[in-house]
Image (cartoon, grey):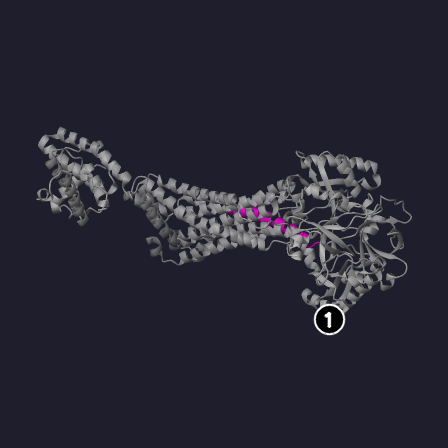
């Protein structure tokens, strides 16, 4: 402002010129410039008159504009103008001091932002790597997995070989189709100590073409490999090549012991080969089977099937086309295909499970977590502003411009944001690593999980926006006309009604959103738990399983094979702490099964339309070792190994094959022999907890001898110890025997849920994050606002209210806010349940079991947060309370 | 003074005026000194801008004067040459003198 002379007799300086001079002068020269101008003006006024003085003043002002402005622009550390680093530093210093004065609020804001940025980024990054990263094959989006659904009987991830041939021949949307079967095979490497067990993909001629796999060394499987009498060949996978051959490039052309025979290594797959099927296989070998194999019966559904869509064809188009082809096949083969339909899924989705529902849940959860984080930040900063009105009024009256205060507020938000952003960026990889550490081996995973830069940017931008939006009410407060009002308000420590309402609304919103997220996460968790608790029909808790690789000597004749298997079982049974031992060709929840068709004697079962079952070749102790109960008739005994062939079947088979009739005593034909059913066993799940139990058949091992061997031991001792002792004993029989893949049975069952467990972990993490953020936010806001009510509480006490009454009154207000949030969140969830159910069948989100603990946590946190300050305030001396802070 | 950093004409005027005024170098005094000797009207703003620049270079320094003993009186900036300012002034004038073909003895009386 222009300085006017105190003496009214003197002519005033030209006001406009003085104003201009004051605007252009640097702050620390302003007073001197104006003083000098006024002094010169007065001199001229006395000597040359007012007009001359005014002319001089204007001239001086105009000629000063250039130098002064130039000075301001070029001056280092100028207080106005483009270079404001000095001021920014001062603002930040002040912001640090302010942040330190309210540590709870500052830490809560920083924590909310850091978690919002770090955790969401980590979780999304992990999800992308695990569930969305494209498979390393050419045009992976064109790869599909085919399966079969059987009306009323569930579905299978496999396809009948004849059906597949028809689909491939008639389809215009499928370019190529391949079928495969994964089986364990014993492999003997020349010069190695003993045999090793390996997983082998037996693929038909179409397989490599579908995937587009090119061998890294040698060649892949070619047509002639599938000819009758062709030399057995294998292509080895990258991992097996490194582990078994040390990555030797001269491996092509060498041979290895393969099952009972030998096979020539003709090539090595690149790393991509290990990405299919999930978990990878060690070797690929041609899939061949005789004309009369069960695989060539329409009834069998046993081969994994993948296909490559023609360019431009969509999965939906292929599904529609396959539906019409399946209908045609149902008309042609009513006996087997009447209830059969084709299933088609993108290969990626088939390997990691349905991605879409999870994506929806995760995306909603992430959005909700960010909303909670932002509501937190806004609320905390807003609460903090409550007592800033006085400070700002004071600063304004001391000459601070509005722009100056805006800068100060932004600097404060910026400071918290920078600290939180840095913490978030540092947190993200750590959280991602922690999640990956829990990642199940059974799922496909790319080499490393990188932090997704885009997600990080989005999270940071959203959080920054929240910090800035939170400043808006504070900035608006600066524009208020009444400084005296603010000064007085501040002095009384009162919180304005608008601020209190906004704050309460934010708490309510925060609680509501958290409730929705947590109910969603709880629903996913329940799905997982429900699957975990599905009865397998097996008593898997004290069962140790392991693969037995037979020595060369045991493979010469079936007799020797069986003798070695029995001897190994007897050694195991004799170990201390082992209650029972059995051996079997296949094992529940382990690789390999024998899916086959059979004829019911007396029924019109004719090839190729046969009823199907899973066949388990087992030693007599198998059922009792696994705890599978006999429901009717008898179990298998040692005497069944020789003599008339008998079988035990599962309840599902009995009900399905012989509806309304007693199954015991019935005869079936299988493997060119006639078997009599002597017992019915309880149903047991053997592979998937999702699907209903399959029809099973238990066959005395001695009747159908195969070298593939699993040992099953019922024991309370640790698996590793048992395996170690058994290895030592086996060596006394033959040093060529090997025990591998030693696992408890319950671990195998759990592994079949690996994907579900990991999802539950991810969504559970998000839910916990939302809960944590909401709790932190509620704690910060509540403890702060209550601590601001010291004076009010003092007055209430002075007016005669009891301490208890006052504290209860404060708590009641807080509880009302939380209750409002719970009701709102619950209502939203109830409304959303119908919508969500459409996307996620079988996921009822609304559940008291999840809701109640969450609500309890919110109330506990809010009460804790309010109780401390409220009680402190109620003890404060009235005079102190009224005097102010 | 850094080599190659020549003083401008007006800067030399201000420094010279300062060297004449000793402890009385208020902005207005400097302006009057230059006006009196050059006969030209000098802008107040130009004087302060130049003083600020010279102060950044370390050639002048200011302190705040005692408060004027009048109602509403206030402290004002009083400028003086620093040692570096004296050296720079001598250097610049010597160079000017040499460039004019005069000898040092005549120039610095």
Q: The N terminus of chain A appears in which quarter of the rendering? A: top left
In-front residue for pair A72/A218: A218
Q: Which residue is mark 1?
A: A576
* Residue A353 on image: x %, y %: 66, 46
Horizontally, is A599 left or right of A878 in the view? right
Q: Main secondary structure of the magenta part?
A: helix
* Residue A220 on image: x %, y %: 70, 46
* Residue A697 on image: x %, y %: 82, 54
The residues colored magenta run: A509-534
Horizontally, is A477 left or right of A824 in the view? left
**Vertical placement of B86 versus A569: above or below?**
above
Secondary structure under the numbered disc 1 in the rendered image? loop
Q: Quadrant of residue A188?
A: bottom right
Q: Chain of mark 1?
A: A
The answer to whether residue B16 is visible is: yes
Horizontally, is A130 left or right of A277 in the view? left
Farthest right residue in view: A602
In-front residue for pair A179/A89: A179
* Label 1: few (<14), some (14–19) or many (≥20) C-alpha neighbours in 10 Å: few
Q: Quadrant of residue A335?
A: top right
Q: Is residue A529 magenta?
A: yes
* Residue A109 on image: x %, y %: 45, 50
């Amino acid at each position: 402002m222009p300085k006017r002379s105190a003496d009214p007799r003197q002519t005033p300086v030209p006001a406009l010129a003085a104003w201009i001079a004051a605007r252009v002068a640097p702050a620390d020269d302003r007073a001197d410039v104006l003083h000098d101008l006024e002094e010169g003006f007065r001199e001229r006024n006395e000597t040359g008159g007012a007009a001359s003085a005014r002319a001089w003043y204007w001239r001086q002002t105009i000629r000063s504009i250039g130098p002064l402005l130039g000075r301001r622009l070029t001056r280092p550390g100028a207080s106005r103008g483009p270079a404001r680093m000095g001021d920014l530093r001062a603002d930040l210093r002040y912001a640090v001091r302010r942040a330190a004065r309210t540590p709870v609020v500052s830490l809560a804001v920083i924590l909310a932002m850091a978690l919002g940025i770090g955790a969401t980024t980590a979780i999304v990054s992990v999800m992308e790597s695990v569930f969305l990263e494209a498979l390393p094959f050419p045009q992976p989006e064109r790869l599909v997995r085919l399966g079969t659904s059987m009306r009323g009987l569930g579905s299978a991830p496999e396809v009948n070989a004849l059906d597949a041939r028809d689909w491939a021949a008639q389809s215009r949307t499928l370019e190529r189709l391949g079928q495969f079967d994964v089986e364990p095979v014993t492999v003997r490497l020349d010069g190695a100590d003993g045999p090793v067990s390996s997983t082998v993909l037996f693929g038909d001629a179409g397989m490599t073409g579908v995937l587009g796999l090119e061998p890294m060394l040698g060649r892949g499987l070619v047509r002639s490999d599938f000819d009758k009498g062709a030399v057995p060949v294998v292509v080895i996978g990258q991992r097996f090549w490194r582990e078994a051959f040390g990555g030797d490039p001269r491996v092509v052309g060498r041979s290895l012991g393969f099952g009972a025979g030998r096979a020539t290594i003709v090539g090595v797959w690149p790393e991509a080969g290990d990405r299919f099927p999930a978990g990878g296989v060690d070797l690929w070998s041609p899939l061949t089977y005789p004309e009369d194999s069960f695989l060539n019966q329409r009834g069998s559904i046993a081969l994994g099937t993948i296909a490559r869509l023609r360019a431009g064809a969509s999965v939906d188009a292929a599904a529609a086309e396959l539906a019409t082809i399946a209908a045609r096949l149902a008309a042609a083969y009513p006996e087997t295909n009447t209830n059969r339909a084709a299933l088609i899924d993108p290969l990626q989705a088939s390997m990691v499970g349905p991605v879409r529902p999870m994506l929806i849940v995760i995306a909603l959860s992430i959005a909700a977590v960010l909303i909670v984080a932002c509501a937190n930040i806004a609320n905390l900063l807003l609460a903090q502003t409550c007592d800033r009105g006085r400070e700002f009024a004071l600063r304004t009256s001391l000459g601070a411009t509005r722009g100056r205060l805006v800068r100060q507020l932004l600097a404060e938000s910026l400071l918290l944001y920078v600290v939180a952003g840095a913490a978030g960026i540092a947190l993200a990889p750590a959280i991602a690593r922690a999640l990956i550490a829990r990642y199940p081996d059974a799922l496909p995973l790319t080499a490393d999980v990188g932090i997704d830069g885009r997600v990080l940017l989005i999270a940071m931008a959203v959080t920054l926006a929240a910090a800035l939006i939170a400043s808006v009410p504070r900035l608006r407060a600066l524009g208020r006309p009444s400084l005296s009002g603010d000064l007085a308000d501040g002095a009384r420590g009162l919180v304005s009604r608008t601020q209190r309402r906004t704050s309460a609304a934010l708490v309510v919103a925060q609680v509501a959103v958290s409730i929705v997220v947590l109910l969603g996460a709880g629903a996913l968790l329940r799905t997982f738990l429900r699957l975990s608790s599905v009865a397998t029909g097996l008593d898997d808790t004290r069962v140790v399983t392991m693969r037995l690789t037979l020595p060369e000597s045991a493979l010469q004749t079936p007799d020797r094979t069986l003798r070695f298997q029995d001897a190994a079982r007897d050694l195991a049974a004799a170990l201390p702490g082992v209650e029972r031992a059995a051996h079997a060709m296949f094992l529940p929840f382990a690789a390999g099964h024998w899916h086959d068709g059979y004829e019911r004697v007396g029924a019109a079962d004719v090839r190729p339309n046969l009823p199907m079952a899973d066949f388990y070749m087992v030693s007599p102790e198998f059922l009792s070792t696994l705890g599978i109960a006999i429901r009717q008739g008898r179990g298998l005994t040692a005497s069944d190994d020789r003599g008339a062939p008998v079988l035990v079947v599962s309840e599902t088979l009995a009900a399905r094959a012989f509806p309304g009739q007693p199954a015991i005593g019935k005869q079936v034909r299988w493997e060119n022999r006639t078997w009599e059913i002597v017992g019915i066993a309880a149903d047991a799940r053997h592979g998937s907890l999702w699907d209903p139990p399959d029809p099973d058949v238990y066959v005395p091992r001695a009747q159908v001898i195969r070298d593939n061997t699993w040992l099953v031991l019922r024991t309370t001792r640790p698996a590793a110890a048992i395996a170690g002792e058994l290895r030592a004993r086996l060596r006394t029989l033959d040093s060529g025997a090997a025990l591998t893949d030693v696992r408890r049975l319950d671990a195998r069952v759990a592994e079949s849920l690996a994907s579900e467990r990991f999802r539950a972990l991810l969504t559970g993490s998000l839910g916990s994050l939302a809960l944590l953020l909401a709790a932190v936010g509620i704690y910060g806001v509540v403890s702060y606002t209550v601590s601001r009510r010291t004076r009010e509480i003092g007055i209430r006490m002075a007016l005669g209210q009891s301490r208890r009454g006052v504290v209860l009154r404060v708590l009641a207000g807080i509880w009302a806010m939380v209750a409002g949030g719970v009701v709102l969140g619950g209502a939203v969830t109830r409304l959303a349940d119908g919508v969500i159910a459409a996307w996620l069948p079988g996921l009822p989100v609304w559940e008291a079991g999840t809701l109640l603990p969450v609500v309890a946590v919110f109330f506990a946190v809010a009460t804790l947060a309010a109780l401390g300050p409220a009680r402190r305030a109620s003890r404060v001396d009235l005079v102190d309370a009224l005097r102010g802070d | 003074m850094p080599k190659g950093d020549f003083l401008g004409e007006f800067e030399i005027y201000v420094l010279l005026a300062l060297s004449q005024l000793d402890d009385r170098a208020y902005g207005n005094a400097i302006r009057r000194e230059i006006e009196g000797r050059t006969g030209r009207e000098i802008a107040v703003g130009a004087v302060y801008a130049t003083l600020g620049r010279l102060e950044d270079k370390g050639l002048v320094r200011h302190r705040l004067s005692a408060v004027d003993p009048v109602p509403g009186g206030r402290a004002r900036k009083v400028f003086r040459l620093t040692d570096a300012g004296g050296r720079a002034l001598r250097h610049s004038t010597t160079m000017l003198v040499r460039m004019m073909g005069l000898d040092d003895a005549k120039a610095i009386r």
